Amino acid sequence: MLIERALRANRKIRMAFVGAGGKTTAMFQLARQLRPPVIVITTTHLTIAQIALADAHFVVESQSNLSAHDIGKRIVLITGPRSDDNKYSCPGNEFLHRILAIVE
């Protein structure tokens, strides 16, 4: 069964994955099953290899110029800046609200 069907995912879905192991894989597998555009945001730390699972990656560090045009028809990952250990984290709350305003 497809994850999309099992979770009854639709266009306006907002979903959180929690647990120990498999979150990133499940998140991107579901994203590939949904009709684009799909925006993926993580609260965990993603490695550079995991970043490659998205079609496009935007890092928001200060005022973001992200627009609906940037999102396009693909899977877009939005993260905060890269840390000293080469991992990317969640953008701040102000950006989450801005991103939601763009896609709604």
Image (tube, rainbow, N blue to C red):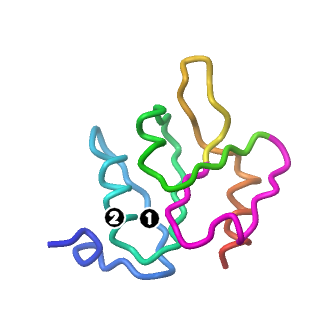
Query: How many angstroms separate mark 1 from mark 2 (CA)?
Result: 10 Å
State which quarter of the image contains the C terminus.
bottom right
Instruction: Give left or right: position of 24 versus 88.
Output: left
The residue under the point 37% across, 56% down is 27
The percent position of residue 52, horizontal first and vertical second, equals 45, 43
Location of residue 56 by image quarter: bottom right
Secondary structure under the numbered disc 2 in the rendered image: helix
Secondary structure under the numbered disc 1 in the rendered image: loop
Q: In the rendered structure, which disc, 1 or 2, sits on the residue that comes first in sequence?
A: 1
Range drawn in magenta: 62-78
The percent position of residue 37, horizontal first and vertical second, equals 53, 72
Q: Label 2: which residue?
A: 30
User: In the image, what residue type sits under mark 1?
Assistant: Met
Residue 82, placed above or below residue 101: above
Location of residue 16 by image quarter: bottom left
Say which of marks 1 and 2 sits in front. Answer: 2
**For mark 2, does the 10 Å Cα neighbourhood hold few (<14), some (14 to 19), or many (20 or more) residues?**
some
The percent position of residue 79, horizontal first and vertical second, equals 61, 45
Residue 86, placed above or below residue 65: above
Q: Label 1: which residue?
A: 15
Decide whether residue 74 is among the magenta residues: yes
**For mark 1, does the 10 Å Cα neighbourhood hold few (<14), some (14 to 19), or many (20 or more) residues?**
few
Instruction: Give left or right: position of 66 versus 83.
Output: right
User: In the image, what residue type sits under mark 2?
Assistant: Leu
Is the C-beta separation of discs 1 and 2 under 8 Å? yes
The residue under the point 41% across, 82% down is 10
The residue under the point 58% across, 37% down is 89
State which quarter of the image contains the N terminus.
bottom left
Location of residue 67 by image quarter: bottom right
Residue 82, placed above or below residue 28: above
